Structure formats: structure tokens, C-alpha cells
Image: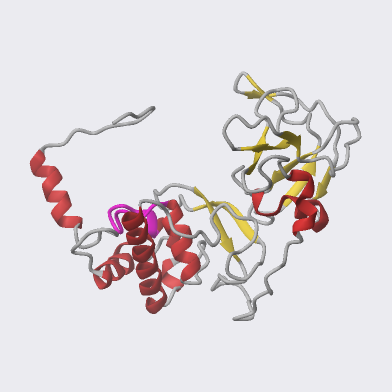
């Protein structure tokens, strides 16, 4: 086993076995899993938490990670910011079951199943926009980047009209013609972001086929800022606009020596429009 920057706690065999036996009925992938016991444990120990913290608490529901949490909440139609005390018991039972199903599918096939909202810009269920922000961490848990669809997962505390979904948006594949490898087509096209200082954060396309030299800037249709430089696309992670893409000057906030430099560029800012985002299609992901 190889690991980096990892903290390890050594415990005796007796303590390890005791913990295993104590949590075996709550383990998302355990053979002795008891769904009703997990639901009761959440209602008993996490009533003051939000549902995201409750699901990630390894003393409550061991085995659930961030991706499993995100997809389980989506399939159960629960907003990840909602408090446990406000969620009906049947919905809590539903998300526990969905997390279990997603976990077991992952275990069986060795890879995660279809992700409806995780690291996506459009909902895989309704085609709506995906919201994204750090959620949790208020009850001793970890604040994790979380994705959800406001249409499919209306908040209990918000005034939402139930069961209102947008129709899935069709993407015109003809708009992707400029991101196609002459030798291998679009199948192997990957979108990447420059990590070096020069052209930092600009988007480009490559072909993942072995030894293929294909390279093309993917942002040629985007405007220039007031400095005369190509703007860069970033994504908001705030509570009000999390998940929305915006354009800004590439010279602002340049990192160097673990610090952020003073403002060097202009104040260019605009929200990304549909036509500007459309050519990227499913290649554009929030964690890019």
C-alpha cells in the first residue's frame, strides 16, 4: 500500500475487532447491513446535523463517501443542505437505501455507477443546471464540495413547486466540430486546463489516443478581456451562485509561491451564456 500525507492510528486487534462488530450492521457494504438500524441511528445521533454531515459520519453510516452521499441524496430527491430534523423518516430511509445500492454496485463492478449530478454541469435526470458549493462541517464533520439539482432536489425550507422538471436539453453535436481529432474523431477528446503560469487556466483539447499529437485551444470562441488577453472560465462555489460558470481576466489571482498576487489585470466579469458553454458539451466538468 502506498500513501502520501496520511495520518495513521495504530490500535490493538481487540479494539479493531470490537469496532468492526459494533458497526457491522451500519456498514454500507456490510453483509449484516440493517437499513432500519441506520435510519434510527441517524435520527438518534444526527438530529441536529444537516443530512450531508449525517451521511458522511463514519460512526453513523460507515462506508459512505462524498460521491455516494451526493448520488444517494439525488436519487432520494433530498437537498444536501437540509437539516435531519426537518426530513420525514421515509425520506431518510430512502436515502439510506440509495446510498447502500450505489455502494454495493460500486463494490460489485469495481467502479462507480452512473453519476447523475457529481462533477456535472447538467442534471442527468432532468437536464437542469447543477448547483455546487461546499456543504457541511457544522457539526464536527468535513465541509465537502457537493453537487445537486435544485429541480430534482427541492429544499424543505424553500418554497418549491413539486415535481417541476425541465425537459432535457439537446446538444447540437455540430457545434463540437472544432474539437475533433483528425485521426481519431471525438471519441478520445479530453478537455484540460493549463496549470503553468503562461496561459494559466485556459482550456484546451487533446486526444487521449496513444502518441496522438492533437492539441487545440478550446476557448477560441470566448472573448478577450480589457487587457487584450483571452478570458478564462471559472465556476462559482458560493451559496448564492454555486455551480454557475463565469468569465474573468486571466491575470487576476495568479498563484505563486503559495500566495496570491495583488490584482494585476482588469475587472472584466460576465456570466457564461448558453452559446458560450454549448460547444464544450459534456467535456466541461466543474472539477476540471
Q: Taking 59 as reference, is 78 left or right?
A: right
Magenta stretch, residue numbers? 54-65
Residue 86 in view, yes or no: yes
* Residue 232 percent across, percent down from the top left: 77, 38
Q: Residue at x 78, y 49 (%)?
A: 177
* Residue 8 percent across, percent down from the top left: 27, 32
**Quarter of the figure with the C terminus:** top right
- Relative height, residue 94 to residue 171 (above, below): below
- Relative height, residue 34 to residue 192 (above, below): below
Which of these two is toward me, 270 or 103? 103
Residue 61 belongs to the span the image colors magenta: yes
Residue 121 belongs to the span the image colors magenta: no
Q: Taking 2 as reference, is 72 left or right?
A: right
Most extreme residue toward the left is 14
* Residue 157 percent across, percent down from the top left: 56, 72
Residue 202 in view, yes or no: no
Q: Residue at x 59, y 37 (%)?
A: 209
Amino acid at each position: 500500500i502506498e500513501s502520501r500525507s496520511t495520518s495513521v492510528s495504530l490500535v490493538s486487534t481487540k479494539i479493531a475487532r470490537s469496532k468492526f462488530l459494533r458497526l457491522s450492521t451500519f456498514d454500507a457494504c456490510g453483509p449484516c447491513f440493517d437499513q432500519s438500524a441506520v435510519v434510527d441511528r441517524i435520527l438518534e445521533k444526527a438530529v441536529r446535523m444537516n443530512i450531508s454531515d449525517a451521511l458522511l459520519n463514519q460512526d453513523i453510516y460507515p462506508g459512505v463517501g462524498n460521491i455516494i452521499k451526493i448520488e444517494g441524496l439525488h436519487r432520494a430527491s433530498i437537498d444536501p443542505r437540509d437539516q435531519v430534523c426537518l426530513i420525514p423518516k421515509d425520506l431518510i430511509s430512502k436515502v439510506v437505501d440509495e446510498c447502500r445500492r450505489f455502494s454495493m454496485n460500486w463494490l460489485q463492478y469495481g467502479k462507480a455507477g452512473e453519476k447523475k449530478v457529481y462533477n456535472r454541469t447538467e442534471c442527468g435526470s432532468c437536464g437542469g443546471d447543477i448547483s455546487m458549493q461546499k456543504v457541511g462541517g457544522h457539526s464536527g464533520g468535513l465541509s465537502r464540495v457537493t453537487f445537486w439539482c435544485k429541480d430534482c432536489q427541492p429544499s424543505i425550507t424553500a418554497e418549491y413547486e413539486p415535481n417541476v422538471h425541465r425537459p432535457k436539453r439537446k446538444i447540437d453535436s455540430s457545434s463540437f466540430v472544432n474539437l475533433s481529432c483528425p485521426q481519431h474523431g471525438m471519441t478520445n477528446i479530453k478537455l484540460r486546463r493549463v496549470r503553468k503560469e503562461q496561459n494559466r487556466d485556459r482550456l484546451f483539447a487533446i486526444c487521449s489516443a496513444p502518441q496522438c499529437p492533437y492539441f487545440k485551444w478550446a476557448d477560441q470562441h470566448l472573448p478577450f478581456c480589457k487587457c487584450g488577453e483571452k478570458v478564462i472560465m471559472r465556476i462559482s462555489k458560493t451559496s448564492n451562485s454555486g455551480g454557475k460558470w463565469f468569465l474573468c481576466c486571466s491575470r487576476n489571482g495568479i498563484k505563486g509561491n503559495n500566495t496570491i498576487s495583488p490584482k494585476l489585470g482588469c475587472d472584466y466579469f460576465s456570466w457564461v451564456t448558453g452559446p458560450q458553454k454549448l460547444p464544450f458539451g459534456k467535456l466541461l466538468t466543474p472539477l476540471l
